[in-house]
Amino acid sequence: MSSHPLLRVENLAKQYQRGVFRKTTTFSLNADFEVQQPCVVGVMGPNGSGKTTLFELITGSNLPSAGRVLVNGQDIHQVRTRERDRLAIHYHQSYQVRSFQKTKPDFMLAHAHSDSPLVHLFDEPQFNTQDGYIGFMLDFFAKLKANGRLVFLCLHPNEPYHVDILRQCCERFIFVQKGVVSEAPDFDTLARDEKVRAYLGALAPGR
């Protein structure tokens, strides 16, 4: 059993800037959290808040301005680009795997310490209400967790059943707004946050 957290996002920051001589920051993301054990983490936040950027940083397909991402103790940005998906993999909407940015020649980087992904990040999957597809996906998330994997499920709820999915399968939550990442231990705690309630609108509990 590893003594390391399954995922450690350590003082992570990403800044986008424009301008050559007088640079102006147009967007910034900051995150600092860890997940010790296999589980399913729900992720929510407005469009453009930084959710996909966070996923890209965790999987090594985007370069951080500062900080580190440690998957089972290994810095993913110091792993050979072709092996980063053995640590963390990002499925973007239609389940297409995101590409990886190359910072150094691979011979200068470390081999991944895993043969298959330890962290699976699902970025707004298109849940089909037909033919038992939702049940299949929820079973899949549960099997990943049972096999020692960490699952992130990012949804932008626009139907009541989206909230039901998050309640049913997620054990903890992350909310991203304007580049600020906050955590909650369960959905009810999350939903008491006024920023979250404003985001959910009519889907917020009690409305």
Image: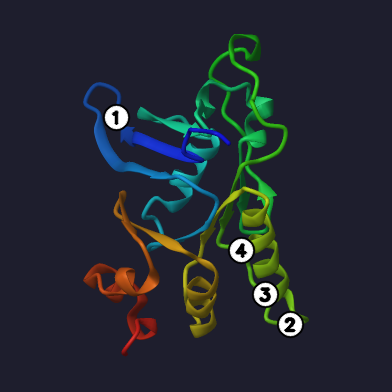
Discs 1/3, front: 3
- Name which quarter of the figure residue 185 lies in: bottom left
Q: At 64% across and 61% down in the image, what residue appears?
A: 141
Q: Which residue is mark 4?
A: 125
C-alpha distance separating marks 4 and 1: 35 Å
Return the residue found at the far front: 1
Check residue 134 in the rendering and tell me which mark sits there, or answer none.
3
Of mark 1 and mark 2, the one earlier in the sequence is 1
Return the residue found at the far right: 131
Assess whether mark 3 and mark 2 are in contact (beta carbons under 8 angstroms).
no
Q: Quadrant of the N terminus?
A: top right
17 is higher (above) or lower (below) than 138: above
C-alpha distance separating marks 4 and 3: 10 Å
Secondary structure beneath label 1: loop
Q: Position of residue 49 (x, y in %)?
A: 36, 55
Q: At 70% across and 62% down in the image, what residue appears?
A: 140
Q: Which residue is mark 2?
A: 130
Q: Depth check: 50 or 149 in front?
A: 149
Secondary structure beneath label 3: helix
Q: Depth check: 189 or 104 in front?
A: 189
Of mark 2 and mark 4, the one earlier in the sequence is 4
Q: Depth check: 177 or 19 in front?
A: 177
